[in-house]
Amino acid sequence: MKVITIKNLTKRFGEKIAVDNLSLEVEEGEIFGLLGPNGAGKSTTINILTGLLKSNRGDIEIFGKSFNSNEMNIKRNIGVVPQSLAIYDSLTAVENVKFFAGLFGLNRRELNEAVEYALEFTGLLEHRNSKAKNFSGGMMRRLNIACAIAHKPKLVIMDEPTVGIDPQSRNHILKSVKKLNKEGCTIVYTSHYMEEVEELCNRIVIIDHGKVIAGGTKEQLISLVSDTQSLEVEIDELESIDERSLKDIPGVKNLNIKENSVVINSIREVNNLDKIINYFTSNNVSIRNIGYKKMDLETVFLSLTGRKLRD
Ligand code: ADP
Ligand code: MG
Protein backbone atom coordinates (compact mmCIF):
# COMPACT_ATOMS: atom_id res chain seq x y z
CA MET A 1 0.00 0.00 0.00
CA LYS A 2 1.11 3.52 -0.75
CA VAL A 3 1.39 5.69 2.32
CA ILE A 4 2.30 8.85 0.43
CA THR A 5 1.74 9.77 -3.20
CA ILE A 6 2.99 13.15 -4.39
CA LYS A 7 2.24 14.14 -7.98
CA ASN A 8 3.69 17.13 -9.80
CA LEU A 9 4.19 19.22 -6.68
CA THR A 10 5.32 22.79 -7.29
CA LYS A 11 5.96 25.55 -4.76
CA ARG A 12 7.19 29.05 -5.51
CA PHE A 13 8.33 31.73 -3.11
CA GLY A 14 8.09 34.81 -5.32
CA GLU A 15 10.43 34.17 -8.23
CA LYS A 16 12.15 31.26 -6.47
CA ILE A 17 10.92 27.77 -7.35
CA ALA A 18 11.58 25.75 -4.20
CA VAL A 19 9.81 22.57 -5.35
CA ASP A 20 9.66 21.97 -9.08
CA ASN A 21 7.14 19.46 -10.43
CA LEU A 22 8.19 16.85 -7.88
CA SER A 23 6.60 13.40 -7.79
CA LEU A 24 7.33 10.50 -5.45
CA GLU A 25 5.71 7.60 -3.68
CA VAL A 26 6.31 6.06 -0.28
CA GLU A 27 5.27 2.48 0.43
CA GLU A 28 3.96 1.20 3.74
CA GLY A 29 6.72 -0.13 6.01
CA GLU A 30 9.57 1.70 4.31
CA ILE A 31 12.30 3.91 5.64
CA PHE A 32 12.21 6.30 2.75
CA GLY A 33 15.08 8.76 2.32
CA LEU A 34 14.85 12.23 0.87
CA LEU A 35 18.46 13.23 0.20
CA GLY A 36 19.64 16.56 -1.10
CA PRO A 37 21.94 19.49 -0.28
CA ASN A 38 20.85 22.55 1.69
CA GLY A 39 18.26 24.48 -0.27
CA ALA A 40 17.21 21.48 -2.37
CA GLY A 41 13.57 21.81 -1.30
CA LYS A 42 13.34 19.03 1.28
CA SER A 43 11.78 21.05 4.09
CA THR A 44 9.39 22.82 1.74
CA THR A 45 8.18 19.43 0.48
CA ILE A 46 7.77 18.15 4.06
CA ASN A 47 5.97 21.31 5.13
CA ILE A 48 3.48 20.98 2.30
CA LEU A 49 3.05 17.30 3.08
CA THR A 50 2.18 18.05 6.69
CA GLY A 51 -0.16 20.93 5.95
CA LEU A 52 2.09 23.78 7.11
CA LEU A 53 2.46 25.26 3.64
CA LYS A 54 0.16 25.41 0.63
CA SER A 55 1.52 24.31 -2.74
CA ASN A 56 0.98 26.17 -5.99
CA ARG A 57 0.27 22.99 -7.87
CA GLY A 58 0.17 19.23 -7.44
CA ASP A 59 -1.72 16.44 -5.69
CA ILE A 60 -0.95 14.73 -2.45
CA GLU A 61 -2.49 11.59 -1.05
CA ILE A 62 -1.66 10.21 2.38
CA PHE A 63 -2.95 6.78 3.43
CA GLY A 64 -4.70 6.74 0.04
CA LYS A 65 -6.78 9.83 0.73
CA SER A 66 -6.45 13.41 -0.36
CA PHE A 67 -4.98 15.58 2.34
CA ASN A 68 -7.50 18.39 2.07
CA SER A 69 -10.60 16.32 2.67
CA ASN A 70 -9.15 14.27 5.54
CA GLU A 71 -6.81 16.62 7.31
CA MET A 72 -7.76 15.78 10.92
CA ASN A 73 -7.76 12.02 10.47
CA ILE A 74 -4.47 12.09 8.55
CA LYS A 75 -2.77 14.32 11.12
CA ARG A 76 -3.76 11.96 13.92
CA ASN A 77 -1.75 9.22 12.19
CA ILE A 78 1.33 11.27 11.35
CA GLY A 79 4.20 12.30 13.58
CA VAL A 80 6.31 15.20 12.39
CA VAL A 81 9.83 15.93 13.60
CA PRO A 82 10.51 19.42 12.26
CA GLN A 83 13.94 20.68 11.27
CA SER A 84 13.72 23.64 13.66
CA LEU A 85 13.07 22.36 17.18
CA ALA A 86 9.43 22.55 18.24
CA ILE A 87 9.67 22.21 22.01
CA TYR A 88 9.07 24.56 24.92
CA ASP A 89 12.27 25.55 26.75
CA SER A 90 10.61 26.33 30.04
CA LEU A 91 8.67 23.05 30.20
CA THR A 92 10.08 19.74 31.43
CA ALA A 93 10.47 16.73 29.14
CA VAL A 94 7.26 15.20 30.48
CA GLU A 95 5.32 18.45 30.09
CA ASN A 96 6.51 18.88 26.52
CA VAL A 97 5.49 15.39 25.43
CA LYS A 98 2.17 15.70 27.31
CA PHE A 99 1.41 18.93 25.52
CA PHE A 100 1.98 17.52 22.03
CA ALA A 101 0.45 14.09 22.62
CA GLY A 102 -2.48 15.86 24.32
CA LEU A 103 -3.42 17.45 21.02
CA PHE A 104 -4.68 14.08 19.82
CA GLY A 105 -7.44 13.66 22.36
CA LEU A 106 -6.01 10.83 24.46
CA ASN A 107 -7.54 10.23 27.88
CA ARG A 108 -5.47 10.62 31.04
CA ARG A 109 -4.28 7.05 31.27
CA GLU A 110 -3.47 6.87 27.57
CA LEU A 111 -1.63 10.16 27.82
CA ASN A 112 0.53 8.99 30.73
CA GLU A 113 1.34 5.80 28.87
CA ALA A 114 2.18 7.77 25.73
CA VAL A 115 4.58 10.02 27.63
CA GLU A 116 6.26 7.04 29.30
CA TYR A 117 6.60 5.23 25.96
CA ALA A 118 8.04 8.24 24.10
CA LEU A 119 10.56 9.21 26.79
CA GLU A 120 11.70 5.63 27.21
CA PHE A 121 12.00 5.28 23.44
CA THR A 122 14.22 8.32 23.13
CA GLY A 123 16.30 7.48 26.22
CA LEU A 124 15.09 10.51 28.19
CA LEU A 125 13.24 8.83 31.06
CA GLU A 126 15.86 9.75 33.64
CA HIS A 127 15.63 13.39 32.54
CA ARG A 128 11.85 13.42 32.56
CA ASN A 129 11.55 16.25 35.09
CA SER A 130 14.34 18.45 33.75
CA LYS A 131 13.45 21.54 31.80
CA ALA A 132 14.22 21.42 28.10
CA LYS A 133 16.38 24.55 28.34
CA ASN A 134 18.91 22.57 30.38
CA PHE A 135 19.20 19.87 27.72
CA SER A 136 22.15 19.43 25.36
CA GLY A 137 21.52 19.89 21.65
CA GLY A 138 21.26 16.13 21.20
CA MET A 139 18.79 15.73 24.05
CA MET A 140 16.62 18.50 22.60
CA ARG A 141 16.60 16.70 19.26
CA ARG A 142 15.57 13.50 21.05
CA LEU A 143 12.80 15.34 22.91
CA ASN A 144 11.66 16.75 19.58
CA ILE A 145 11.29 13.15 18.40
CA ALA A 146 9.54 12.04 21.61
CA CYS A 147 6.92 14.75 21.06
CA ALA A 148 6.30 13.49 17.53
CA ILE A 149 5.92 9.77 18.28
CA ALA A 150 4.04 9.65 21.60
CA HIS A 151 0.62 9.27 19.94
CA LYS A 152 1.95 6.21 18.04
CA PRO A 153 1.53 7.51 14.50
CA LYS A 154 1.61 5.11 11.54
CA LEU A 155 3.82 7.51 9.59
CA VAL A 156 6.70 9.53 11.00
CA ILE A 157 8.29 12.29 8.95
CA MET A 158 11.70 13.48 10.13
CA ASP A 159 13.34 16.59 8.75
CA GLU A 160 17.11 16.56 9.36
CA PRO A 161 16.74 15.11 12.87
CA THR A 162 20.48 14.85 13.50
CA VAL A 163 21.76 18.27 12.46
CA GLY A 164 24.41 19.66 14.77
CA ILE A 165 24.47 17.03 17.49
CA ASP A 166 27.04 14.86 19.24
CA PRO A 167 27.84 11.38 17.82
CA GLN A 168 26.24 9.62 20.80
CA SER A 169 22.86 11.29 20.32
CA ARG A 170 23.17 10.75 16.61
CA ASN A 171 23.67 7.01 17.07
CA HIS A 172 20.79 6.92 19.49
CA ILE A 173 18.52 8.60 16.97
CA LEU A 174 19.57 6.31 14.11
CA LYS A 175 18.91 3.28 16.31
CA SER A 176 15.50 4.55 17.36
CA VAL A 177 14.51 5.22 13.75
CA LYS A 178 15.28 1.57 12.93
CA LYS A 179 13.39 0.37 16.00
CA LEU A 180 10.37 2.54 15.20
CA ASN A 181 10.33 1.06 11.72
CA LYS A 182 10.57 -2.51 13.09
CA GLU A 183 7.51 -1.76 15.20
CA GLY A 184 5.61 -1.12 11.97
CA CYS A 185 5.99 2.59 11.45
CA THR A 186 6.61 3.99 7.97
CA ILE A 187 9.33 6.61 8.01
CA VAL A 188 10.29 9.48 5.76
CA TYR A 189 13.82 10.53 6.62
CA THR A 190 15.14 13.78 5.24
CA SER A 191 18.84 14.57 5.37
CA HIS A 192 21.82 16.01 3.59
CA TYR A 193 24.03 13.41 5.29
CA MET A 194 24.63 10.74 2.71
CA GLU A 195 26.01 8.27 5.31
CA GLU A 196 22.81 8.33 7.37
CA VAL A 197 20.54 7.88 4.41
CA GLU A 198 22.73 5.02 3.14
CA GLU A 199 22.60 3.29 6.51
CA LEU A 200 18.89 3.71 7.19
CA CYS A 201 16.86 3.90 4.05
CA ASN A 202 15.67 1.04 1.87
CA ARG A 203 14.69 3.51 -0.86
CA ILE A 204 16.05 6.94 -1.60
CA VAL A 205 15.07 9.87 -3.75
CA ILE A 206 17.81 12.39 -4.49
CA ILE A 207 16.60 15.93 -5.02
CA ASP A 208 18.33 19.12 -6.12
CA HIS A 209 16.85 22.53 -6.94
CA GLY A 210 13.39 21.18 -6.12
CA LYS A 211 13.60 18.41 -8.70
CA VAL A 212 13.96 14.64 -8.41
CA ILE A 213 17.40 13.77 -9.80
CA ALA A 214 17.21 10.01 -9.27
CA GLY A 215 15.48 7.44 -7.10
CA GLY A 216 15.71 3.80 -6.10
CA THR A 217 17.50 1.50 -3.71
CA LYS A 218 21.07 2.37 -2.80
CA GLU A 219 22.26 -0.33 -5.20
CA GLN A 220 20.12 1.03 -8.04
CA LEU A 221 21.42 4.55 -7.47
CA ILE A 222 25.00 3.35 -7.37
CA SER A 223 24.51 1.41 -10.60
CA LEU A 224 23.84 4.77 -12.29
CA VAL A 225 27.57 5.43 -12.03
CA SER A 226 28.82 1.93 -12.76
CA ASP A 227 31.12 3.41 -15.42
CA THR A 228 32.90 5.40 -12.71
CA GLN A 229 35.58 4.54 -10.18
CA SER A 230 36.66 6.58 -7.19
CA LEU A 231 40.28 6.98 -6.15
CA GLU A 232 40.84 8.54 -2.75
CA VAL A 233 44.17 10.24 -2.15
CA GLU A 234 45.04 11.30 1.39
CA ILE A 235 47.38 14.25 1.56
CA ASP A 236 48.31 16.94 4.08
CA GLU A 237 48.45 20.03 1.92
CA LEU A 238 45.03 20.26 0.32
CA GLU A 239 45.54 23.98 -0.43
CA SER A 240 48.29 23.10 -2.86
CA ILE A 241 45.96 21.17 -5.15
CA ASP A 242 45.21 22.77 -8.48
CA GLU A 243 41.76 21.44 -9.36
CA ARG A 244 42.04 22.49 -12.99
CA SER A 245 45.16 20.40 -13.66
CA LEU A 246 43.74 17.36 -11.89
CA LYS A 247 40.54 17.60 -13.91
CA ASP A 248 42.61 17.81 -17.10
CA ILE A 249 44.04 14.34 -16.53
CA PRO A 250 42.45 11.99 -19.10
CA GLY A 251 39.46 10.07 -17.71
CA VAL A 252 38.88 12.34 -14.70
CA LYS A 253 35.18 13.26 -14.42
CA ASN A 254 35.06 15.23 -11.20
CA LEU A 255 36.72 15.82 -7.84
CA ASN A 256 35.48 15.87 -4.28
CA ILE A 257 37.85 17.71 -1.99
CA LYS A 258 37.38 16.59 1.60
CA GLU A 259 39.01 17.46 4.91
CA ASN A 260 42.10 15.27 4.55
CA SER A 261 41.77 13.82 1.11
CA VAL A 262 40.69 14.32 -2.44
CA VAL A 263 38.39 11.84 -4.15
CA ILE A 264 39.04 11.63 -7.88
CA ASN A 265 36.24 10.08 -9.92
CA SER A 266 37.30 8.73 -13.28
CA ILE A 267 35.89 6.76 -16.14
CA ARG A 268 36.56 3.14 -15.20
CA GLU A 269 37.91 2.20 -18.62
CA VAL A 270 40.63 4.83 -18.60
CA ASN A 271 43.73 3.77 -16.73
CA ASN A 272 45.04 7.05 -15.30
CA LEU A 273 46.49 5.92 -11.97
CA ASP A 274 50.09 6.66 -12.95
CA LYS A 275 49.16 10.12 -14.28
CA ILE A 276 47.33 10.95 -11.06
CA ILE A 277 50.22 9.80 -8.87
CA ASN A 278 52.57 11.71 -11.11
CA TYR A 279 50.56 14.89 -10.62
CA PHE A 280 51.09 14.73 -6.86
CA THR A 281 54.74 13.72 -6.90
CA SER A 282 55.74 16.28 -9.52
CA ASN A 283 54.11 18.98 -7.40
CA ASN A 284 55.96 17.76 -4.29
CA VAL A 285 52.74 16.83 -2.51
CA SER A 286 53.37 13.72 -0.45
CA ILE A 287 50.68 11.07 -0.54
CA ARG A 288 49.81 9.59 2.87
CA ASN A 289 47.52 6.93 1.53
CA ILE A 290 45.88 6.05 -1.76
CA GLY A 291 43.24 3.56 -2.80
CA TYR A 292 40.11 2.90 -4.78
CA LYS A 293 37.05 3.31 -2.59
CA LYS A 294 33.56 1.83 -2.55
CA MET A 295 31.08 3.85 -4.56
CA ASP A 296 28.75 5.94 -2.40
CA LEU A 297 25.78 8.27 -2.83
CA GLU A 298 28.01 11.32 -2.47
CA THR A 299 29.72 10.32 -5.71
CA VAL A 300 26.38 9.53 -7.34
CA PHE A 301 25.18 13.01 -6.47
CA LEU A 302 28.37 14.63 -7.69
CA SER A 303 28.25 12.71 -10.96
CA LEU A 304 24.60 13.55 -11.62
CA THR A 305 24.69 17.23 -10.62
CA GLY A 306 28.34 18.29 -10.79
CA ARG A 307 27.95 19.61 -7.24
CA LYS A 308 28.80 18.45 -3.73
CA LEU A 309 26.13 17.44 -1.25
CA ARG A 310 27.75 19.58 1.41
CA ASP A 311 29.35 22.87 0.46
P1 ADP B 1 16.15 22.20 2.21
O1 ADP B 1 15.22 21.83 3.31
O2 ADP B 1 16.36 21.09 1.23
O3 ADP B 1 17.43 22.74 2.72
P2 ADP B 1 14.21 24.29 1.71
O4 ADP B 1 12.97 23.56 1.35
O5 ADP B 1 14.30 24.82 3.09
O6 ADP B 1 15.47 23.37 1.36
O7 ADP B 1 14.41 25.51 0.73
C1 ADP B 1 14.31 25.38 -0.69
C2 ADP B 1 14.52 26.73 -1.33
O8 ADP B 1 13.40 27.58 -1.04
C3 ADP B 1 15.74 27.47 -0.82
O9 ADP B 1 16.30 28.18 -1.89
C4 ADP B 1 15.18 28.41 0.21
O10 ADP B 1 15.98 29.56 0.32
C5 ADP B 1 13.82 28.74 -0.36
N1 ADP B 1 12.82 29.03 0.68
C6 ADP B 1 12.39 28.17 1.64
N2 ADP B 1 11.44 28.74 2.42
C7 ADP B 1 11.27 30.00 1.95
C8 ADP B 1 10.43 31.10 2.33
N3 ADP B 1 9.56 31.01 3.34
N4 ADP B 1 10.52 32.22 1.60
C9 ADP B 1 11.37 32.33 0.56
N5 ADP B 1 12.19 31.33 0.14
C10 ADP B 1 12.15 30.18 0.83
MG1 MG C 1 15.57 21.71 5.32
Image: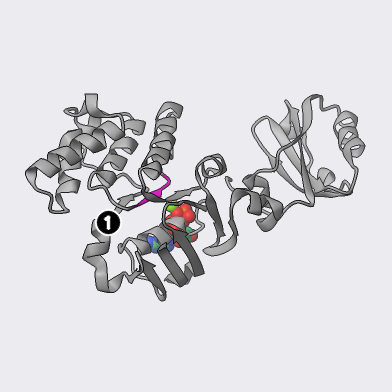
Q: Is residue 274 visible?
A: yes
Q: Residue at horizontal 65%, vertical 43%?
A: 296
x then y, percent, for residue 24: 49, 65
Quadrant including the N terminus: bottom left
Q: Residue at horizontal 35%, vertical 33%?
A: 137
Q: How many marks?
A: 1
User: Coloured how?
Assistant: one colour
Q: Quadrant of residue 124?
A: top left
Q: Is residue 158 above or below residue 139?
A: below
Q: Is residue 96 visible?
A: no
For this orientation, the residue located farthest to the left is 108
In this view, the residue in front, 160 or 106, is: 106
Residue 295 in the figure: left or right of residue 89: right
For this orientation, the residue located farthest to the bottom is 57
Q: Is residue 245 magenta?
A: no
Q: Is residue 56 above or below residue 82?
A: below
Q: Residue at horizontal 71%, vertical 38%?
A: 294
Residue 305 in the figure: left or right of residue 90: right
In this view, the residue in front, 219 or 167, is: 219
x then y, percent, for residue 6: 44, 68
Residue behind mark 1: 77
Q: Amino acid at mark 1?
A: Asn
x then y, percent, for residue 207: 55, 58
Residue 63 in the figure: left or right of residue 16: left
Q: Is residue 274 above or below residue 80?
A: above
Is the stretch drawn in magenta largely helix, strand or loop?
Answer: strand
Quadrant including the C terminus: top right
Q: Secondary structure at mark 1?
A: loop
Q: Residue at horizontal 46%, vertical 56%?
A: 42
x then y, percent, for residue 94: 17, 35
What are the residue bounds of the magenta stretch? 155-160
